[in-house]
Amino acid sequence: MARASVRVFHKLEGLFSIYKPPGVHWKLVRDTIETNLLKGINAAPPPAPRQRVQFLAEPTSVVAEGSNELTLSAASVPALAHHPLVSGPEFLHIGVGVGHRLDVFSSGVLVLGVGQSNKALTDLYRSHVTRDYTLEGELGMATDNFSHTGRLIERTTYDHITRDKLERVLAMMQGSNQKALLTYSKVDMSTQGAYELAVKGELRPDGKSPPIMTGLRLLHFQPPHFTLEVQCLNETQRYLCRILHEVGLELRSTAVCKGVRRTRDGPFTIQHALTHQHWTSTDVIQAIRQYRSSRKASKAKHTQPGKDTGTASQRQEMAEEAAVTGDSHRLHSVLTSKAFGS
């Protein structure tokens, strides 16, 4: 029978998401979680100590008077070589992988995997799942790295900017990205399936592509501050900051990024991300169990007889599920059916 610590480790093999606070490097977050998980694994009750036979000398009172013979008796005693205080903790390292990373400046959902589930992180990244961000911008200044932490290189006016002008610029930028998405998706737009995917905004690039925005809208505008919601593919943190810089240029002004917050990474949302006080083995096991249950329920819903399972939204969800579970054959078949609009 497997030891308690080994059983705990197997329960931790899966994907889960945490909320990364701003100002903290992702490596520190990973190391902190790895340390907490090791503490939880090694805190499991140790197995019963092994017994060994040892010959002990009989007490002097038991030996007959005047006898010079040494009397020994067999006794079962614990084998101290396997005691935790002698051998040390059973687990010294576990592999904790990080999905699409966030830099020190950014915050939000960060997906991690433990053990053999690290392969699913790579499959999730290659499946072209979309990610949602909330970007905080400020008009009237430009820096060398497009964020407020960079070196100031220019100041501009912004009194002429209105909400309508800003929304028109955002619509223009989203339209140009939609054209790029059509180019990189390599889908014949004359087919009905491709048309449905385009209408629902569910086209995905075929192979490698540059960062592409699939959605862009204004959430808040109070000059000089404004907030955007962005859905994108293959993005980097610098690309997100550059979006705000380009928005400022299109408005005949300048803008810098004051905050990047990821609210969704594929199937992982901010509502289920573990905050710092919940980065423990118990909470991680519960998060992995809840995520597996939700994916199984979604899979059962899509495979019910008599229901149409071939819509574009369902195919996208099935593709994300196949990426997370590491089912490469299923992922290929889903993406192929999407490409041909079947």
Image: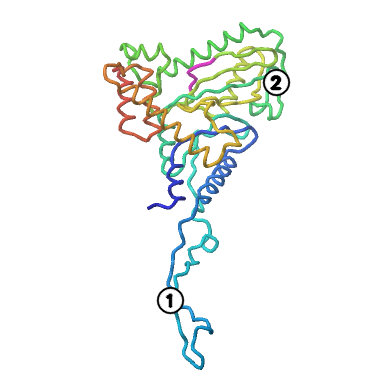
* Camera-side residue of 226 and 190: 226
Element type at mark 1: strand
Query: Main SS of the magenta segment?
Result: strand
Q: Which amino acid does label 1 sit on?
A: Ala
Quadrant housing the C terminus? top left
Give the residue pinned by disc 2: 141
Can you tell which of label 2 and label 1 is closer to the viewer?
1
Residue sitting nearer the eye, 102 or 8:
8
Residue farthest along the top direction in this orientation: 164
Q: Nearer the viewer, residue 177 or 107?
A: 107
Q: How far apart are marks 2 and 1 (CA)?
A: 85 Å
> Which residue position holds label 1?
74
Give the magenta range. 212-216
Alpha-carbon neighbours of circle 2 within 10 Å: few (<14), some, or many (≥20)? many
At a point 66% along the width and 19% down the height, the residue shown is: 255
Looking at the image, the residue that sits furthest to the bottom is: 66
Secondary structure beneath label 2: strand
Horizontal side of 109 relative to 115 (left or right) equals right
Q: Which residue is drawn at 46% across and 84% down?
A: 71
Numbered label attached to residue 154: none
